[in-house]
Amino acid sequence: MSFHSILEKIAENYLWFLLIILLVNLQQKRYLPRSLHKRMATLLLAVLALVLEIALALILAKGWPDWLVFIALAIVISVAVIMHDRFWPFRLHCPKCGASLKWKEIIGSDGNICDECYQKEHPEEFVEPEIEKPEIPSSVDDIDWNNWEAEQNCVITYLFRTSESGERQVLLIDKKTGLGKGLVNVPGGHIEPEETAVEAAVREYKEETGLDIKNPAHIGKLHFQFLDGTTLAGHVYFCEDFSGDIHETDEARGFWCPVSEIPFDRMWEDDRYWLPEALSGMHFSVVSVFDGEKMLSLKFSKIEDKEGND
């Protein structure tokens, strides 16, 4: 292939080169205002490339000697070298820390500073604005419970037995981890996405006590609104059928307690309001507002149980 043919081939495909430069310029727009200087540099490079394209087109169209393209190329390179700060401000390493720059930093960071160094120099640009959270009412009467949604859904299960002496007992736990740590409660936990509430009750009971429970019966639902914004809904189950032996776990230490001696003073405050009613056979729904472990407001309602074994 002759040199003239090579020049013709270059002229035919030169627009692709210009297009690439302009695409880089569009990419730099994503990194404003850090890329103002480099955006101008790519535009200037596009201008030089266009000048060279015009010179090449004239040489081919007018039939001028092919060697004139070297003069045009020398002029373009000379201008780029003399004004290199404006035409080629791109670097591969950060001048502050010497780290290799990423692609976006090479084409979009004026001063060729890496993101980490830029953040140190401009901390004000990385401060997240404080989002004003709506104030949580401290009374259940001031909350629209019809449109209230729980971020977390969980279960708790009360397991009962009759001792050899005929005493009615319930299995309680000393909570060792998580929400309510240090309080007396009953086994329970979060409902996983792939399981039903009943399946969660059986699983959590096994994990916390080592016991296998069967046929837990749904008796009510708890709705907790905390002042920090946490929302929690809990399904309450009663159960009589179980097998196995109690084992202390990392989460809980289980113990049998006479129903008549349930230590309400060591439990969540709401328990003393709804648990005695539930023990009498009532199905219920409770809404409450808490500040940490301190109860601020509560409303208890008797209901027809519609939750079933969901």
Image (cartoon, helix red, strand yellow):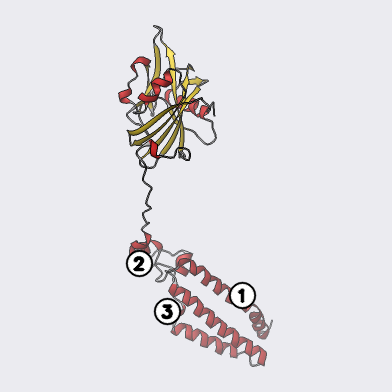
| Callout 3 amino acid | Asp
Quarter holding residue 5: bottom right
Of the residues under marks 3 and 1, which one precedes in the sequence?
1
Is residue 122 visible in this depiction of the protein? Answer: yes
Displayed quadrant of residue 187: top left
Spot occupied by residue 300 in the image (x, y as percentages of width and height) = 41, 28
**What secondary structure is found at the residue carrying circle 3?**
helix
C-alpha gap between disc 2 and disc 3 = 18 Å
Residue at numbered disc 3:
85
Give SS at disc 2: loop
Which residue lies under the disc numbered 1?
16
Identify the mark at residue 96; answer none if there is no mark: 2
At a point 50% along the width and 35% down the height, the residue shown is 192
**Residue, far top:** 165
- Name the residue rendered at 37%, 31% in the picture: 298
- Which label belongs to residue 70? none
